[in-house]
Every structure is written in structure tokens, then in C-alpha cells.
Image (cartoon, grey):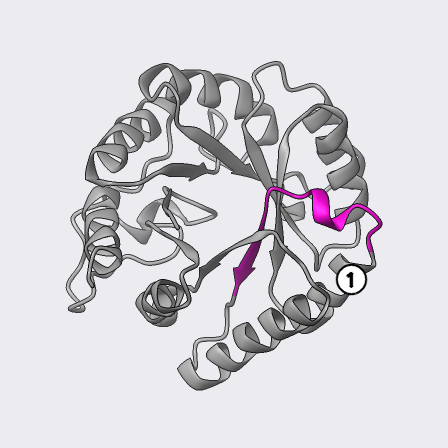
Amino acid sequence: MIVQACLNGARKPDFHPALPLTPDAMTADAVACIRAGAAELHIHPRGPDLAESLAAVDATIAAVRTACPGTLIGVSTGAWIENDVRKTRDCIANWSVRPDYASVNLSEPDAPQVMEVLGSIGVGIEAGLATVADAERFLALADHQKVLRILIEIEDQERTAAFKVAQDIESVLAHAGVTRSILLHGFDATAWDFVRMARQQYWSTRIGLEDCRLMPDGSLAPGNAALVEAAVAIYRQA
């Protein structure tokens, strides 16, 4: 089980005053999150205009890796980033500084092709599942057991409904005999509920400004490191 720090995601600059959007800011937050107990990092590199960019992966990963040697660093391949399936694949294929892993959303039409490109350059894959349909599509892939891990990520903001989706996905995976590790997380209203659920299930989780901006007590988080510290405290409970 690990706590992964998700530093920024697709959040807009006004989401939180400490949202890291430049390589220097992401690097500083990465160091702080590792010190707070995060085992891995998940980041969304940004270009000079602060928009998400797969072309910005090289510079950002290089900076963060230098500051956090030995820490696994992942990125997103979300289709919305480049909004062009060919450009997405080309950007990935041309990375000169490769992340250790990348998340791929099975809800996106080009997901199998993106996974194929990642595999061809030796980048691990987090298979992102948000629905039972995503899980069934994942299981239909010939090489599904070769992914690094399963990323169950639920966007539903109603706790009971969100928990049911997560449990249904896990049930489908278990029935199929999937042996990959699971990382579970929610968003905003369900973020801390899913951290606790992941801990109870002995799964990994993630936390950071990509997923929420509030501490477990409902107060505004000072930044990513405080969120990580709170999640690690939950994981250290007996």
C-alpha cells in the first residue's frame, strides 16, 4: 500500500493559491510531498502558457527526478490534454525523458492505442477505470495483466453511489482473477472517504490538489504536502 501525491491535475489556476503549475513549483511540491510521506508522484506537466501539455513532460520529469531521485513519477495521458489522438501518441513516442508510468483512461476511445505506445517505450501503465464498462473493456485487452496497476477513480460525488461503483469494479476484476495492485481515489466531496476505504481494503490511494483542496476536517489545505501528511496519518492508523 502506498500514498501517491497528485499535485495539480487539470485544475485551473484559481482552484487553490498553492496549485503548482510550473516545473519549479511542481519540483518544490514534489520534494515536500515525499518528505510528508508520499511514496510516488503523479503530475500533469504544463507548458509556458500553464496549459496541460504532453510536450512539456521532458522538462518537468527531468526537474522532478533530479530533486526526488529514486521516486517513481507518473503523468496523465488524458485525451483532453492535446485533444488530438494522433498528437497524443506522437508526443508520447517522442518523450526523451520518460516518466516511470502513465495513467490511461479506459473510457477514452484511443486507450488501447495509447497503452500500446507506452508499452513500446517502456513506460508502465496505470489502467484508469471509472465504470464497470471500463473494467470490462480493460479485461478484453490481451495484455491487461501486464499493466503496472489498476487505478479505480470515481467521480460521482454522492458517497453511497460512488462506493457502489468502486465495489462493482473491484468485483468484476476479482471475478476475472486480476492480480494487479489497486490504487483507489475519489474527487472533491468523496476524496477522503475513498482514502479511508482504500486503507480498509489494503489498497493504495492518492491525494493532492488534483483530487481536492480541503483537509479531512473541511478546512482549506495549505497545499499538497498537508494533504499527503493527512492521508499518511490515516494509513498509519491501526
- Residue 157 vs residue 85: left or right? left
Q: Quadrant of residue 39?
A: top left
Residue range of the region highlighted in magenta in the rendering: 141-153
- Residue 66 vs residue 165: left or right? left
Above or below, 64 against 6 in this view is: above
Q: Is residue 142 magenta?
A: yes
- Residue drawn at x 45%, y 37% is 43
Q: Quadrant of the C terminus?
A: bottom left
**Residue 40 percent across, percent down from the top left:** 39, 37
Q: Quadrant of residue 176?
A: bottom right
Q: Which of these two is toward me, 198 or 225? A: 198
**Residue 139 percent across, percent down from the top left:** 77, 60
Toward the bottom, the furthest residue is 160
Q: Which of these two is toward me, 12 or 237? A: 237
- Residue drawn at x 56%, y 16% is 97
- Residue 7 vs residue 115: left or right? left
Q: Is residue 61 magenta?
A: no
**Residue 114 percent across, percent down from the top left:** 75, 39
- Residue drawn at x 43%, y 76% is 157
**Residue 85 percent across, percent down from the top left:** 77, 41
- Residue drawn at x 32%, y 67% is 196
Above or below, 191 against 79 in this view is: below
> Which element type, helix, strand or loop, lies under badge 1?
helix
- Identify the residue position indicated by label 1 in the image: 137
